Image: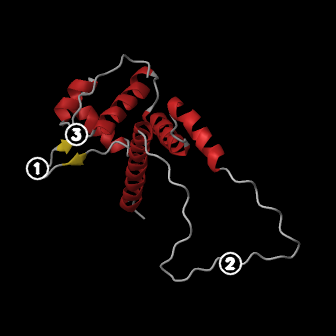
Amino acid sequence: MTQAAVHIPEKLFFKIGEVCDITGVQAHVLRYWESEFPMLAPQKNRAGQRTYRRRDVEMVLRIKELLYEDQYTIAGAKKKLTSEIRGASKLKVVTPEMSAALVAEQQQYATPPPAAPAPHAQAPAPTYASDNERAPSAPAFAVTDERRAALKRLRDQMRDLLTVLDSADAALKRRPK
């Protein structure tokens, strides 16, 4: 982001007024953006108040940047965010510290390619003693703090993607036929 870094407090949930203070966007603008951007969907508590999560606040900051600084239209910002979310889901999360360890592990467990089967030969299907028996699993890898953090980021991205898909499904169901 080109704007100055914004400090988001370490909290699980934020009220709309807190999000307004953090992002510098008025509440009515946030409510309008919720109607325009399906990826911005704060949950509501039992009292009906919006509860924003950290990723919602980050999404508000990104929308603000696209609209106010990069001068995107609402439609253009929607397309940009959708492509960013799709692109992020295709990326493999690897920190620089992890890359050397991953390469070493991949080389350690790499197996040579199988020999080419004879012409017209058919590989036998694997057989197991019972239905409950499982196929051999891949080697287990040590879970490091870096991997745990990368998996948490991936989990959050997947949740964001599910939110977008759920919003799109809901929008399609609301559309008159």
Specify few, some or many for label 2: CA neighbours under 10 Å numbering under 14, 14-19, or 20 or more: few
> Is mark 2 in CB contact (under 8 Å) with mark 3?
no
- As drawn, the residue found furthest toward the left would be 47
Mark 1, residue position: 47
Residue type at mark 2 is: Ala
- As drawn, the residue found furthest toward the bottom would be 130
Which numbered disc, 1 or 2, marks the residue closer to the eye? 2
- Tell me where residue 126 sits by quadrant: bottom right
Picture disc at residue 157: none
Q: Position of residue 22 (x, y in %)?
A: 24, 25
Apparent side of residue 39 relative to residue 87 in the rendered image (left or right):
left
Q: Earlier in the sequence, mark 2 or mark 3?
A: 3
Q: Is residue 177 above or below residue 31?
A: below
- As drawn, the residue found furthest toward the right would be 119
Q: Is residue 157 above or below residue 63?
A: below
Mark 3, residue position: 12
Mark 2, residue position: 125
Residue at 50% in and 36% down? 80
Residue type at mark 1 is: Ala
Q: Quadrant of the C terminus?
A: bottom left
> Is mark 3 in CB contact (under 8 Å) with mark 1?
no
- Tell me where residue 152 sits by quadrant: top left
Question: SS class of the residue under badge 3?
Answer: loop
Specify few, some or many for label 3: CA neighbours under 10 Å numbering under 14, 14-19, or 20 or more: few
Q: Is residue 163 above or below residue 134?
A: above
Question: SS class of the residue under badge 1?
Answer: loop
Specify few, some or many for label 1: CA neighbours under 10 Å numbering under 14, 14-19, or 20 or more: few
Q: Earlier in the sequence, mark 1 or mark 2?
A: 1
